[in-house]
Amino acid sequence: MSDVAFLLLIFIILLSLINYRRELKIDYPEARRAPKTSAEKNLEIWIDREGRVYVDGLPSDLEGVQNAVDDIYRAAPDTRLHIIADRNTPYRYLNDVISVLQLLQYRVVSFVVKEGPG
């Protein structure tokens, strides 16, 4: 019986590692009310304050963003796209990513913010 419990524990640990989510250290902008979305069917584009772009935690360039968004749209058109940028990220870096999304005419985009006081 203990062998089965041990194997089950190993199985659970391995499954939790498969669903590991890569995150970057970001200082989120704040909003008074932030609507919640489900974590399923999301594609996250991270932009740090130096303008480096990450797609689901992996380093990318604008062409990589375009390919990832195009691929995800073909596979699941209802996928939400989340843009997560540091509070101190210059707007020109956000504009580059938004321009790619405009080119692709992707319409399900959310800007992720931290809920602020008030």
Image (cartoon, rainbow, N blue to C red):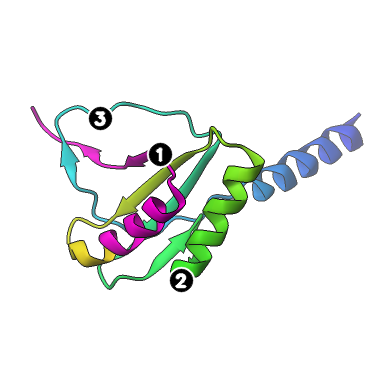
Task: State the extent of the magenta-drawn residues as a range.
Answer: 94-118
Report the residue marked by disc 2: 61
1 and 3 marks in contact (CB < 8 Å): no
Asked if residue 99 is among those painted magenta in the image, a careful observer would answer yes
Three-letter residue code for mark 3 = Ala
Specify whether residue 108 is in view: yes
Distance of label 1 from label 3 (alpha carbons)? 19 Å
Q: Secondary structure at mark 2?
A: loop
**For the residue labelled by badge 1, is the local secondary structure a helix, a strand or a loop?**
loop
Q: Quadrant of the N terminus?
A: top right
Residue 90 in picture, x, y percent from top left: 18, 65
Whichever of labels 1 and 3 marks the residue nearer the N terminus, that label is 3
The mark lying in front, picked from 1 and 3, is: 1
Q: Is residue 104 left or right of residue 27?
A: right
Residue shown at 59%/47% (left/top)? 72
- The residue singled out by tag 1 in the image is 107
Residue 46: image x %, image y %? 39, 57
Please indicate, yes or no, whether residue 89 appears anywhere in the rendered image: no
Q: Is residue 20 left or right of residue 35?
A: right
Between residue 109 and residue 50, name the one nearer to us: 109
Question: What's the mark number on residue 34?
Answer: 3
Mark 2 touching mark 3, by CB under 8 A? no
> Residue at left 24%, top 40%?
114
Q: Quadrant of residue 68?
A: bottom right
* Circle 1: residue type: Arg
Q: Which class describes the residues within 10 Å of circle 3: few (<14), some (14-19), or many (20+)?
A: few
Front label number (2 vs 3): 2
The correct choice, above or below, for 94 with respect to 63 in the image is above
Q: Amino acid at mark 2?
A: Asp
**Residue 101, position as x, y percentages in the image:** 40, 52
